[in-house]
Amino acid sequence: MSLISTQTVAEHASPESCWIIVHGRVYDVTEFLPEHPGGSKIILKYAGKDATEAYDPIHPPDAITTHLPKHKHLGPVDPQTVVKIERVLSEEEKKRQELVASRPPIDEIVNLHDFEAVAKAILPPKAWAYYSSASDDEITIRENRAAYQRIWFRPRILRDVSVVNWSTTILGYKSSLPVYISATALGKLGHPDGELNLTRAAGKHGVIQMIPTLASCSFDEIVDAAVPGQTLFLQLYVNRDREITKRYVQHAEKRGVKALFITVDAPQLGRREKDMRMKFVDESGVAKVQDGDKNVKKDEGVARAISSFIDPSLSWKDIPWFKSITNMHIVLKGVATPEDALMAYDYGLAGIVLSNHGGRQLDTARSGVENLIDIVAALKTRGPWPNPRFAIFVDGGVRRASDVLKAIALGASAVGVGRAFMYSFCAYGQEGVQKAFQIFRDELEMNMRLIGVRSIDELTSDLVDASGLHAHVGITPTDNLYNSTYQPLALAPFRAK
Ligand code: PPY
């Protein structure tokens, strides 16, 4: 294949003929422009140029090759014609890099909040905005923490807790912790290795990872990074084109993924205002939201820009189809009521995740752990509980082993942790995730001893007092550690005309 010079590429810099370079190869994306989930404008910014740096954090490496027909793959760029441009760092970026270099040594990290504080300090503002944002007034994201603080322990004493064991099984697969890594998207916004940090750490420590549909790394890269026998689950956003979904699901099963977690709480993406505002801030820090540019879509941030493929027509009628295309366990992620929990059970699914999507979807939705109480009560009407054929998971706001133990005591099989593991790799890469596992282990050991349980199956509801859980009044002590890393919602900056 002949080489293409950068000068030739530069001649195709318009909507009529738009070529871009990604990872040293030239692509003709002219016809793809109207189909790009993020809109054509962002591609046109790189028309005739190298788009790799902008492409990388928000696309798996194979996205362009799988979405563009073969005849639009024009070939390799001629390296002789590539002019290396010295990158000039902005003052803000320089300061950020200094902060990265001077972050606290990992031994000084003592809890999961610490990772979040470091991540907040060192992440590029767009990454922090995307990861930390939650919908509307961010009430639910706060409630996810607050709910755990309305549950109190009723510890038992004198039970010989010299040996305690917190390993368990999740959907029948061994897990060294009663915690799994929940899906969070776009890992490379926060660290060059993205989700592979999680995979590698999980492989070393026997923890189960749920691979996100919208990972920055490709699905196969993640599976390839797993060690033999490592258990992986898959989170699924259902595509409007069911053939794409079918291929993706069947490929995952072939590659050994054990369970499919279908996201059911995001037929439309929540309005995460912190993320949305970022879209409008240009290099000079000026908020474009105020300049009346009709071409700027005002309702987008990183997330909304890439969410248009998700099918809002997904319904219960699709469940038999999913069962027909895969033998993996099927779990619905984002269940919030006993009515839907019973439907999931009656459809013969393997379980549900009581989740509000980390507070990023319906604001003022209740916390998963609060919903757990009513949902367990409802499932008990279907027969003996716990039921080995149906698992309940909870996610959202988990930062302490005590949170995990409370959810399990109330009937959860295991608990999902998303942001906290993500912040641990944003701050310290794979080592950060391993340290986060160690913190969970240390806290589990201490808390299990202090509660008087030796194994996960000894955690029963009599060990907690959840009588105040449904009372949504502010009588809990202030969560200082958490509140110091979360910021109030900011108004777009004003500027002089
Ligand atoms: C989220 O941001 O909450 C996600 O679940 C990931 C995502 C990212 C971009 C579009 C849709 C969903």
Image (tube, helix red, strand yellow):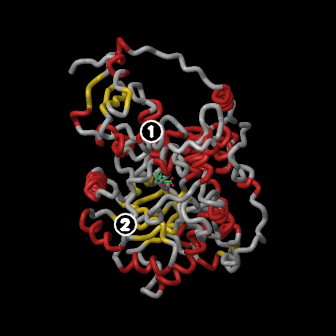
In this view of the protein, which residue sits in the foreground, 128 or 425?
128
Residue at numbered disc 1: 41
**240 sits to left or right of 199:** left
Q: Is residue 164 left or right of residue 243?
A: right
* Mark 2 neighbour density, 10 Å: few (under 14) some (14–19) many (20 or more): few
Q: Position of residue 178 (x, y in %)?
A: 52, 61
Mark 1 lies on a secondary structure that is helix
Q: Is mark 2 within 8 Å of ligand 1?
A: no
Q: Gap between marks 1 and 2, in whole Å?
A: 27 Å
Residue at horizontal 63 percent and vertical 54 percent from the top: 442
Quarter holding residue 373? bottom right
The residue wearing badge 2 is 313
Q: Position of residue 414 (x, y in %)?
A: 51, 65
Describe the element under mark 2 as helix, strand or loop: loop
Compared across the picture, whether 154 is left or right of 367 comes to right
Q: Earlier in the sequence, mark 1 or mark 2?
A: 1
Q: Position of residue 470 (x, y in %)?
A: 66, 78
Residue 302, placed above or below residue 52: below
> Disc 1 residue type?
Lys
